[in-house]
Image (cartoon, grey):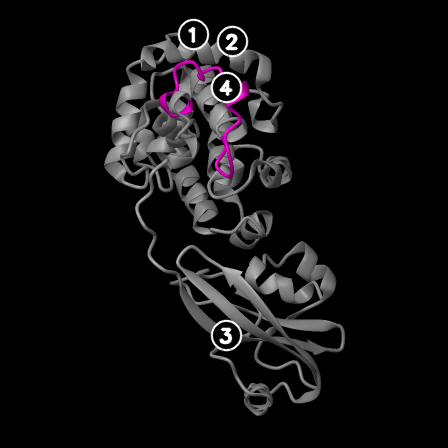
Amino acid sequence: MLEKLPELLLPWFAENRRDLPWRKDREPYHVWLSEIMLQQTRVEAVKGYYERFLRRLPTVQALAGAQEDELLKLWEGLGYYSRVRNLQKAANIICETYGGTVPQNYDELRSLPGIGAYTAGAICSICFEQPTAAVDGNVLRVLSRLLASDAPVTEERTKKAAAQALSAVYPAGHCGDFTQALMELGTTVCVPNGAPLCEKCPLRTLCRACLAGSQLRYPVKAPKKPRRTEKRTVFILRCEDRIAVCKRPKTGLLAGLWQLPDMQGELTLTQMLETAENWGVHPRELEKTVQRSHIFTHVQWEMTGCYLQCGQKAQFYWVTPQEMREKIGLPTAYRQFLEE
């Protein structure tokens, strides 16, 4: 069945492909950057980030030489900050080992920080016309419905089997388009949320789930572990025209990023004021408290935001609103408190 995919998908893709910034060329750095940005992030959200990032860091060499704070500011709001750190680590290796040229060999790409089987497959097929499948959630969803497969798509062995099966049917000279066609079908037709748009699908006459009317049964996923909840108290400390920020620890969640000062647990009003006093900022006025949430992959933060006017700029790094906008890369979990 899979051997029929190229003849059905390639004409469909030629007519229906979206005009996306990273499809304007097949420069390996551009494809690599876009694939890393698109992990865990919607296409529409990525467009602006991609173009802004390339304007500032147009080459692998520029990425390798960027200052960390600037790099994190460019990534601000995309989340999963280890992605951009690994981008820079890989860029440094590419400059040192490969003369600044992204390697064409799949195994060499896989050895670089942050580049897994999917990203390496995408780069090799799109940029270098190699028959290397790029299997992500979209592609797995297409295959699971096409084959009516009960194999859990969350298991690594399912991904490996899918990549092996697809790589065997890649059309010579059209590998890049075939990879992108599979991605496009999963994103725009065989959609993740709600019923797939089977009437628009070029594979509908082959699809076992469609023929059986069982599309919503697939893909099969293993049960997720429950997400744990943590309570935190976040301090929005203002003194004159400045606001307090500090760096997070170098390990753990959001490692090394800027943050608003915070404490574990949900503090009482008295505890909030005592904490601020112990920091030496001389709290003068409690403006308000608010409740906010932020969801990470494995943990959910339930946060109380404490807004204090202070009489002393002590202990922390105090920045102006302009510096906050232009220089400080603040994770969304904290930035939401500045959007009041």
Which numbered tag is attached to residue 232?
Answer: 3
Which numbered tag is attached to residue 201?
Answer: 4
Residue closer to the observer: 280 or 271: 271
Residue closer to the observer: 224 or 49: 224
**x and y percent of residue 239 in the render?**
71, 79
Marked residue nearer the N-terminal end (3 or 4): 4
Whether the magenta-drawn stretch holds residue 196 is answered as yes
26 above or below 258? above
Marked residue nearer the N-terminal end (4 or 2): 2
Q: Which residues are magenta?
A: 191-210
Distance from the alpha carbon under mark 3 to that under mark 4:
47 Å
Q: Is the residue marked by circle 4 packed among few (<14), some (14-19), or many (20+) residues within 10 Å?
A: some
Quarter of the figure that contains the N terminus: top left
What residue is disc 1 on? Answer: 7
Q: Circle 4 sits in a helix, a strand or a loop, which is it?
A: loop
Marked residue nearer the N-terminal end (2 or 3): 2
Q: Which amino acid type is shown beneath numbered disc 3? A: Arg
Does the CB distance between marks 1 and 2 fall below 8 Å? yes
Q: Which amino acid type is shown beneath numbered disc 4? A: Cys
Distance from the alpha carbon under mark 4 to that under mark 2:
12 Å
Instruction: Indicate the quadrant where residue 167 lies.
Output: top left
Q: In front of the other: label 3 or label 4?
A: 4
What residue is disc 2 on? Answer: 11
Marked residue nearer the N-terminal end (4 or 1): 1
Q: Which amino acid type is shown beneath numbered disc 2? A: Pro
Distance from the alpha carbon under mark 1 to that under mark 3:
55 Å
